[in-house]
Amino acid sequence: MVVNSISFFLEKLQRYLAQVEVSPDSEDNMKTAYLDLAECYKLLEDDLSRSEKLPFEPLSEAFALIVNGLNRNSLDNTKIGINELLKFYLRKIQKANQEKCTHLFLIRINCVFVYSLLPSFPFTDMLWQYICKCIQPVGFYLLEKQLTEACLIFSDYIAIMGKIAAREGLPTDKLQHYLRMTETKALEIGLDQLAGHVKNHRHNLEL
């Protein structure tokens, strides 16, 4: 029987993403049996001597699948991966976890984009165009739900990608349009801080 590799990829990716849980912003990251020095404020000798087990991280597994698609120059799988990351991001986000959830998912979108800039990946332009098309519906959804902190962080990641894209000679007009529309919509509903925030990002991209 012939296996549809794209369908298999999507099924496996969705299975991992469905297991992702995002704790509220007010809670510290869950402690695990694995010692991560970057998360350690003060290191004790006992910490270094205990046995460790790496926890299962479904979001990391999903991200690895997408990167594997990049390694194999699979534009379709990579686009599906970005699409699923963003859809599950919107499914998982709530007012209580909007900061943590946005960072968790958007940093991986950012990493996929940066990875796609490697000379070995031949579809950088097409992937960037796809990412740009995804940004507006996601950002507007966050705004409609009045997830203000998520909107601020989301625009920060968009601006970072935009600056990198501009340095690489990739177009940023769609990002600028999204930021302008977000600024207008934010002003209409009284979110002046958000409007000023995205306006600043837009001006920086226009330079």
Image: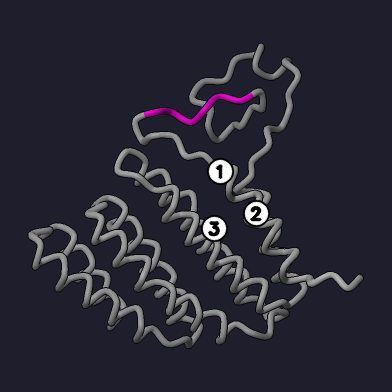
How far is mark 1 from mark 2, CA to CA? 10 Å
Q: Residue at x 76, y 19 (%)?
A: 51
Q: Position of residue 179 (x, y in %)?
A: 26, 74
In the picture as drawn, the residue positioned furthest to the right comes out as 1
Classify mark 3: helix, strand or loop: helix
Residues under numbered marks 2 and 3 in contact, where contact means CB atoms less than 8 Å apart: no
Magenta segment boundaries in residue numbering: 27-32
Residues under numbered marks 1 and 2 in contact, where contact means CB atoms less than 8 Å apart: yes
- Is residue 99 depicted above or below 127 in this figure? above
The residue carrying mark 1 is: 20
How far is mark 3 from mark 1, CA to CA? 14 Å
- Upstream in sequence: badge 3 or badge 1: 1
The residue carrying mark 3 is: 108
Whether residue 2 is visible: yes
Q: Which of marks 3 and 1 is in front?
A: 1
The residue carrying mark 2 is: 62
Tell me which amino acid carries mark 3: Arg
- Is residue 7 depicted above or below 129 in this figure? above
How far is mark 2 from mark 3, CA to CA? 10 Å
- Is residue 163 depicted above or below 153 in this figure? below
